[in-house]
Every structure is written in structure tokens, then in C-alpha cells.
């Protein structure tokens, strides 16, 4: 991979890590579901011209992908950020969606894994247990539950998206916003005061900046650039570098947000990341084995 592509990948990781900070800041002024609605409204306005109708047999899968990876995932993670005292624990905990995706692939797609991948899954979930014993996490168990459920629906959406056909990444971003907005708006209307909250918050320039960063930077630029990269390189070659996202998010949380992660949180996070890295590398190895041409028969 050329050096400029590595630089782009690092930039994507930094943008996605910074999104935790931007969202946490905006959620100090906006209620979580209302922020999610405002974010998706901005995304839809910007990418609406790229919206393309999918094939008729893809509608149900597209709806399921958008509601899991969009409405449910972001509503839950923003609820967690709105209730949490720090950013670091959420950024680290969200990585369990990788072992969850592997387990769902086994349950729903019939995929098989060996004991090495199973050990990586066990290591990642062991890290979650260690993080759960950290005093900061114990003091906000509701946040722990919200993040784990958010990771689960993201993993489910990832599995569903494997068989979604004929929908480009920016068209999916448009559909994700369009199909996620109706349930999110109903939920915001039921639980919050979205109109008054958005009007009050958007009068503050810093909230606008955070919203633009989240919608334009993380969604459109981040995902668009990532899709551009995976069109040119094997996805298993790129995904290990995505572990930089939680690492950078923790560093930004400490430097910008004032997080003070304890030793159990850091140890548990390290175990989660080690397990995720191991699972990712095993997937990359299995992909290479499947692509390897058969040996020539002996004479």
C-alpha cells in the first residue's frame, strides 16, 4: 500500500476517534436522540443527490441494515456518551462488536472458526469483564449496558450488510439517514423536546461545529475515504489499522476531555484490543489460505 494511502488511513482513524469527543461535547448541549436526529438530517441533506433506488429484493435487508447500524447503534452510543463521565471506556468497549460479529457469523451464516480465533474472542470478552470491575465503569453500569447493546446491533448490521447488493457507500449513507430518521424522530418526540432543544443548541457555534464534524467528517469523509481504500486494497489488510481508533480516542479523551482511566480500564481495554487484533489477523490469514492456488499434482 502506497505511503499516501497509509496516511489517508491514519487520517480516517483520527477523524473517527475525534468523533467521540465532538459527540460528547455536543451532548452537553443537546439531548442524545435529538443530536442523532440533527446529525442524520445534515447527512441526508448533503448526500441526498447520491441516493439511488436499490433492487426490489434488497429493500428489507437495506431497512434492517439501516435500523441496526444507524438508528439503534447511534441512538444507543450517543445515549451512553450523554450519560458517561468519560469517553475512553466507551471507545474501548465498542470494539467488542468485532468478536460479536464473529459469533453472529457462526450462528447466522454457518461460518466456522478454529480454536485460535475462539481464544481471541475469549480474550476480548475477558477484557470486557476486567473493564467492568473498574470503579469508573461500576459507577455507570447503565452506560456499560448501552454500549454493549450498541456494539451488538452494530455487529448484527455488519453481518446483514455482507449480503446487501447494489448499494454504494454514499448511497447507503443517504438511505441510512432517510430510513433511520422516522423512528428516531418518533423516539425523540416521545422522550425528549427535540424542537426546542435543537433550536436552542444550534444558536451556539461550537455545537454547529461538533454536528458538522460528526456528520461531514465522520460519516461522509470518513466512510467515503474508507470505501475508496477498500476498493483498492484487501479489507483484511486494512482492518487491523482500525484498532488505532480506540487508542487515539483514549489519548484524545485524556488530552482534550480530561479522562483519567484507571488501571483496570486500561488493562481491560488492552485485552479487548489484543483479542480484536488476533481475530482480525486470523481472518486475514484464513482469507489468504482460501485464495492460495491448489498445489500441482505430483507426477
Image: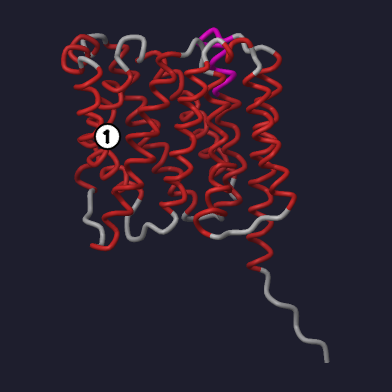
Residue in view at x 65 percent, y 32 percent: 272
Residue 83 in magenta?
A: no
Mark 1 nearby-residue class (10 Å; few <14, some 14–19, many ≥20): many
Q: Position of residue 72 (x, y in %)?
A: 36, 34
Q: Position of residue 108 (x, y in %)?
A: 50, 55
Residue 251 in magenta?
A: yes
Residue in view at x 46 percent, y 44 percent: 226
Q: Position of residue 287 (x, y in %)?
A: 63, 60
Name the image colouring: secondary structure
User: Measured along the vertical axis of the image, is residue 168 above or below residue 240?
Assistant: below
Q: Secondary structure at mark 1?
A: helix
Looking at the image, which is closer to me, 249 or 6?
249
Asked whether, in this view, residue 87 is left or right of residue 134, the answer is left
Asked whether, in this view, residue 122 is left or right of residue 151, the answer is right
- Outermost residue, right side: 299
Q: Quadrant of residue 38?
A: top left
Q: Position of residue 256 (x, y in %)?
A: 51, 11
**Count of all numbered marks drawn on residues in the image:** 1
Residue that badge 1 annotates: 43
What secondary structure do most residues of the magenta stretch adopt?
helix
Residue in view at x 45 percent, y 45 percent: 156
User: Measured along the vertical axis of the image, is residue 143 above or below residue 117?
Assistant: above
Residue stretch rendered in magenta on the structure: 249-259
Asked whether, in this view, residue 48 is left or right of residue 251, the answer is left
User: Measured along the vertical axis of the image, is residue 272 above or below residue 26?
Assistant: below
- Outermost residue, bottom side: 299
Residue in view at x 68 percent, y 48 percent: 281
Image quarter where the C terminus lies is bottom right
Looking at the image, which is closer to me, 284 or 138?
138
Amino acid at each position: 500500500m502506497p505511503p499516501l494511502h497509509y496516511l489517508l488511513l491514519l487520517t480516517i482513524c483520527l477523524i473517527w476517534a475525534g468523533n467521540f469527543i465532538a459527540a460528547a461535547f455536543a451532548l452537553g448541549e443537546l439531548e442524545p436522540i435529538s443530536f442523532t436526529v440533527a446529525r442524520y438530517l445534515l447527512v441526508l441533506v448533503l448526500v441526498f443527490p447520491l441516493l439511488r433506488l436499490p433492487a426490489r429484493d434488497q429493500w428489507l435487508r437495506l431497512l434492517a441494515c439501516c435500523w441496526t447500524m444507524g438508528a439503534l447503534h447511534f441512538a444507543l452510543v450517543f445515549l451512553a456518551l450523554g450519560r458517561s463521565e468519560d469517553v475512553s471506556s466507551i471507545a474501548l468497549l465498542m470494539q467488542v462488536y468485532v468478536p460479536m460479529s464473529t459469533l453472529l457469523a457462526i450462528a447466522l451464516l454457518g461460518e466456522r472458526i478454529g480454536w485460535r480465533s475462539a481464544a481471541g474472542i475469549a480474550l476480548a470478552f475477558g477484557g470486557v469483564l476486567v473493564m467492568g470491575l473498574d470503579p469508573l465503569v461500576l459507577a455507570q453500569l447503565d452506560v456499560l449496558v448501552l454500549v454493549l447493546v450498541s456494539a451488538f446491533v452494530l455487529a448484527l448490521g455488519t453481518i446483514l450488510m455482507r449480503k446487501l447488493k447494489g448499494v454504494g457507500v454514499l448511497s447507503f449513507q443517504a438511505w441510512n439517514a432517510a430510513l433511520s430518521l422516522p423512528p428516531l424522530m418518533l423516539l425523540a418526540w416521545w422522550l425528549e423536546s427535540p424542537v426546542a432543544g435543537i433550536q436552542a443548541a444550534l444558536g451556539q457555534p461550537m455545537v454547529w461545529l461538533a454536528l458538522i464534524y460528526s456528520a461531514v467528517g465522520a460519516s461522509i469523509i470518513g466512510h467515503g475515504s474508507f470505501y475508496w481504500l477498500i476498493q483498492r486494497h484487501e479489507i483484511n489488510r486494512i482492518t487491523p489499522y482500525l484498532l488505532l481508533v480506540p487508542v487515539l480516542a483514549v489519548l484524545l479523551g485524556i488530552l482534550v476531555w480530561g479522562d483519567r482511566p484507571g488501571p483496570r480500564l486500561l488493562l481491560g481495554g488492552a485485552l479487548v484490543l489484543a483479542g480484536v487484533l488476533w481475530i482480525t489477523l486470523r481472518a486475514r490469514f484464513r482469507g489468504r489460505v482460501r485464495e492460495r492456488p491448489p498445489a500441482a499434482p505430483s507426477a
